[in-house]
């Protein structure tokens, strides 16, 4: 079963905005020239819109649409909507990526840390690429650290005796991201020249229980959503998870290091 659909908190998510935005900048740095100017660009899973602005900086004349299924995230993103400094246009629309199908041609379809929330996303690639112009690009990055304590401890806790009846299927599963070779194979068979790589960021976090604070913005959201109507249970679960994270990610005098591996794909359509 898929993980529970989370309710998002843009403020919590943006507490670590710099670390969350950096991989998208690294992804876009490898995207080649697009086949049209002005370009038409889609940002799948745009969240609060802060990284969508990176697209406008790279392609200032482009018409860019950010898509997301969270009303809370889209409400925050609207602050960026409108004309861009380079004469382009930035707008946002509600869409569920498990069902989204392009209705126009794009020169770039990009996604930042979203596809691991989309069960069966590999099967969507063919339809999405049908909407990419020849010479256009499909580029995305996803966390590829589901074997890290951040996630493995959360899964183990969710299926423990105390929580399995309520949270056993709530959190994200190990197979929500595929091996790099799987993405390369799928995109190459779809006629793309695919560049696939991984990077591990040594994220230095600060504050009280910073790894828990990070998780509250992403991985922990499904569990928080399921337990939202029972604050006592929610707080108890969070406290147990916090204690596990404290042991797994000890604090040093300079902060707490959260190693975070991400997978990148830039696929140019032939």
Image (tube, rainbow, N blue to C red):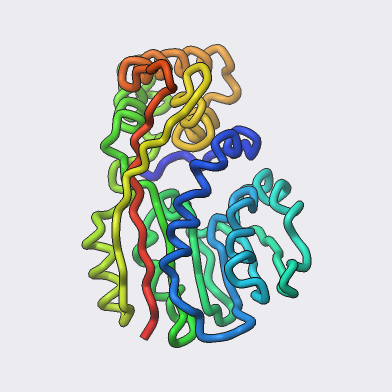
Which quarter shows the C terminus?
A: bottom left
The residue lying toward the viewer, choosing from 193 and 54, is 54
Q: Identify the residue at horizontal 31%, vertical 69% (top origin).
A: 195
Q: Identify the residue at horizontal 62%, vertical 36% (top origin).
A: 9
Q: Is residue 39 above or below residue 186?
A: below
- The residue at the far front in this view is 254
The residue lying toward the viewer, choosing from 50 and 224, is 50
Residue 227: give x, y in percent of width and height: 53, 24
Q: Is residue 218 left or right of residue 248?
A: right
Residue 183: give x, y in percent of width and height: 29, 64
Residue 75: give x, y in percent of width and height: 73, 48
Q: Is residue 143 above or below residue 131?
A: above
The residue lying toward the viewer, choosing from 85 and 91, is 85
Q: Identify the residue at horizontal 37%, vertical 31% (top origin).
A: 258
Which quarter shows the N terminus?
A: top left
Choose top left, top right, bottom left or bottom right for residue 82.
bottom right
Q: Is residue 172 left or right of residue 12?
A: left
Q: How many marks?
A: 0
Residue 243: give x, y in percent of width and height: 39, 13
Q: Identify the residue at horizontal 48%, vertical 24% (top origin).
A: 210
């Amino acid at each position: 079963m898929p993980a529970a659909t989370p309710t998002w908190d843009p403020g919590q998510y943006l507490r670590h905005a710099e670390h969350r935005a950096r991989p998208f900048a690294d992804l876009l740095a490898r995207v080649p020239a697009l086949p049209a100017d002005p370009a038409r660009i889609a940002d799948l899973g745009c969240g609060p819109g802060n990284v969508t602005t990176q697209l406008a900086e790279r392609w200032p004349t482009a018409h860019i649409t950010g898509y997301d299924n969270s009303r809370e995230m889209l409400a925050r993103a609207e602050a960026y909507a409108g004309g861009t400094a380079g004469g382009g246009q930035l707008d946002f629309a509600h869409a569920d990526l498990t069902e989204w199908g392009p209705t126009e041609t794009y020169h770039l379809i990009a996604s930042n840390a979203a596809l691991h929330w989309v069960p069966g996303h590999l099967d969507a690639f063919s339809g999405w690429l049908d909407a990419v112009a020849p010479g256009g690009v499909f580029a995305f990055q996803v966390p590829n650290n589901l074997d890290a304590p951040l996630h493995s401890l959360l899964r183990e806790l969710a299926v423990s005796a105390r929580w399995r009846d309520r949270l056993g299927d709530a959190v994200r599963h190990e197979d929500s991201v595929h091996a790099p070779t799987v993405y390369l194979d799928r995109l190459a068979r779809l006629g793309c020249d695919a560049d696939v790589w991984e990077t591990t960021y040594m994220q230095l976090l600060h504050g009280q229980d910073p790894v828990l604070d990070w998780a509250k913005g992403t991985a922990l959201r499904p569990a928080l959503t399921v337990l939202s109507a029972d604050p006592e249970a929610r707080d108890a679960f969070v406290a147990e998870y916090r204690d596990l994270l404290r042991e797994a990610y000890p604090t040093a005098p300079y902060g707490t290091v959260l190693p975070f591996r991400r997978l990148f794909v830039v696929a140019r359509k032939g």
